[in-house]
Image: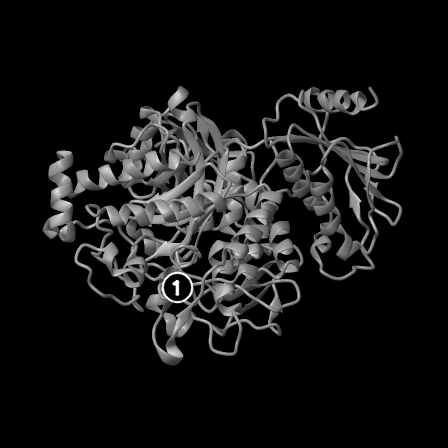
Amino acid sequence: MKHITPLLVLATILLSPTIQAAEAPSIVPRPQQMKITGGAAFRLNAQTKIRYQGDQQQVSELLASALRPATGFPLPVLKDTQKDSNRILLMTDPHLKGTGTEGYTLVANSSEIEIRAKTTRGLFNATQTLIQLLPTKIHSKTKSSNTQWSIPAVAIQDHPAFPWRGMMLDVSRYFFTKEYVLRYLDMMAMHKMNALHWHLIDDAGWRIEIKKYPRLTEIGGFRGKGENRYGGFYTQEDIKEIVAYATARNITIVPEIELPAHTLPALVAYPHLGCFNKKFEVPTRHSISPELYCAGKETTWTFLEDVFTEVAALFPGTYIHIGGDEARFSRWNKCPDCQARMKKEGLKNGHELQGWMTTRVEKFLKTKGKRIIGWDEILGAGVSKDAGIMTWHKPRTAVDGAKRGNPVVMSLTGHAYFDVAESKLPGEPPTATWIKPISLEKAYTWDPIPAGLTGAAAKNILGASGCIWTDQFLHKAHILADKPGQGTTASEAYVDYLSLPRMGALSEVCWTAKTSRNYENFTGRMRTMLARYTELDYQYRIPVPDVTVKPNAEKTFTLSATPAIVGGTIRYTVDGSTPTTDSKVLNGSVNVAKVAGFRATTFAPGNKRHSLLFQYSDPSNKYGKQGTLIGKWKSGQVGNTKAKEVIFDATGHINSNGLYTITFLFTGGRQRLDIDGIEVVRNDTVPVGKDIHHGFTGGSRKDNTYKIKVSNYETGASFKIKAMIYGDEGADSNGVVLIRKGE
């Protein structure tokens, strides 16, 4: 009975409408429910103990090991045998409601922190929240003597929106050490990501030891010759260590063993696995090879079943990824063995042969207690409803698969392919260019559940997975590859840069309820998260300063920005030169006579790293005759089917009496924007004029311009545009507001 009281307190706090929350801690991903209770904080000190009930010692030890280096406190981990104070208690409760299998409750007061969850997985997720309740110095590898280790009095009830929250790491195109894979798992764990899709096989290298076929790694694990020979692989002992490390951190590893395409290293090592027993070399340049496993030979099936038997024994998770993408059938069309197989099985073409091959693998893996998951190409291959579908380039497959009953994971190229840059700014590293850049905002503002999918079908969307493909190491090896004798830090920094902070965005897409997600709020919390990345020495992409440029009546400009990182600075110049650590600091705002030469850069704490360069460009040039940009509306900021007042600042743009035209232009989102009218006010209260009519923009547009005649202009006055706007079927709408003088 001694633990009933905190649960009653938690329920009262979270359900009471009278509780007024103070400024919430910056936690990513955002918890479902969190209240600051207003009591005294819990303070970690040298006498603090970590206690656990049941068999939760391992997760408790992981928490202690995370807290000890920076605090210097012993933090003993003890069985919960007595009621005492100054403790952190971890316990499982099978009767806990509202948390699911990965959720938790966390109640902190001045004397203790109590964490409850149904499972160890939930407890681990709670510890990641607990760490983010502490100052960013908690991530320091050495003792931080001048830090107060306070945790606010808080009550949290939390659980993930989706059960699959993943990242894909391609180690075939470029091999990463075991140590870096472990580090990447830590990176995922702090974001509560729970699935590492491990791309172990592709044309550029075979990275997993198979005992029965040693040539797969001895030969297929390397490419090039002489001093240019490059490669590596993971022994089965390495894999056991990585899997155990991941499991302790609530991460399931899903290995990808490609077939029938992207398998060239296997054919290099064992030529008889191909259609014509030809000899090949592991390629040193990226391409999609036409070579496939020969589906007609039984020797191929002996090989595949042997490989999958060893793989299934190494990975305890439910799924094994079998690829299935980008198969070209020219070899099968000419192969007598494949043609004989097609005739025997009554198959018409290569596509049907791939389907037969896929279903045969699926049936075999079922005998090992596994299910397959593959790229969206496998959906039409006759797989069962148990097969997972990973949608990457055909969004319709997610809808079709979910309605059919298949579990679906969303890895959409437009939101989750993080091997493309965040921008087209000068200074971005070499990245994939076949799709448009994916900004942090684009990585955040989407929903894994396709529009219109509801009920049981919507529940078949398991979640989403970000992808870090590394084929650029083949395209741009002279730039990206680690140099001999210089370690592996360059390649690892590249993956860090592509992953962060977009992994933070994806984690919130997968964890936080859509109704609680807001990009502006997210970027505010990411200011602290980026400081945590700095302490952890993650080589993340530092956000370019988000500079607001406002023209003033006296023909000067006010430029303002807030550093995107807690403890960071924005430094600027006005002569067109690149800012350095000696340049002026932008504290809030600055007035300048001209903006053409303005440059700004974000510097991380300590000034060791900095962002790409912000350069002012006149937005009016982008929109031509439609006007000058004065504001943007973003997803979640507009009304949801009902008009909501949103204010845009036109100060400086309305700079004399006359007629002004205001235009609303849709730029993205699921819903068009409807406008019921606008009103312009001077100094927040004095009416200037109204234009009340219905218009819309998005897909098509009609009557989306509004005209205001200003006849009471005052020098130095502010002018605001109050717009009544809403999404026609929701609030997922983005766009810009433009103003020009005249018709």
Query: Would you say residue 580 is visible in this rendering?
Result: yes
Task: Look at the numbered disc 1 and give the secondary structure of its residue.
Answer: loop
In depth, the one of 650 and 742 nearer the eye is 650
189 or 638: nearer the viewer: 189
Which residue corresponds to mark 1?
A: 221
Scheme by which the image is coloured: one colour
Could you classify mark 1 by the number of other residues whose Cα lies within 10 Å: few (under 14), some (14-19), or many (20 or more)? many
Residue at the spot 61% in from the left edge and 50% down from the top edge: 529
Q: How many marks?
A: 1
Q: Could you tell me if residue 706 is visible in this image?
A: no
Q: Position of residue 323 (x, y in %)?
A: 33, 46
Q: Nearer the viewer, residue 636 or 239?
A: 239
Q: Is residue 641 left or right of residue 343?
A: right
Quadrant in which the C terminus appears? top left
**Relative height, residue 518 to residue 68 (above, below):** above
The residue closer to the viewer here, 146 or 705, is 146
Q: Can you tell which quarter of the image residue 223 is in?
A: bottom left
Hey, what amino acid is under mark 1? Gly
Image spot of residue 77 (x, y percent): 80, 43
Q: Please state if 667 lies on the left or on the right of 184 as rendered.
A: left
Relative to residue 55, is residue 47 depicted above or below? Answer: below
Which residue shows up at 42% across the image and 65% down it? Answer: 429
x 58%, y 42%: residue:
192
Picture coordinates of residue 331, whole percent (x, y) = 15, 53
> Where is residue 485 drawn, in percent x and y?
52, 79
Q: Quadrant of the N terminus?
A: top right
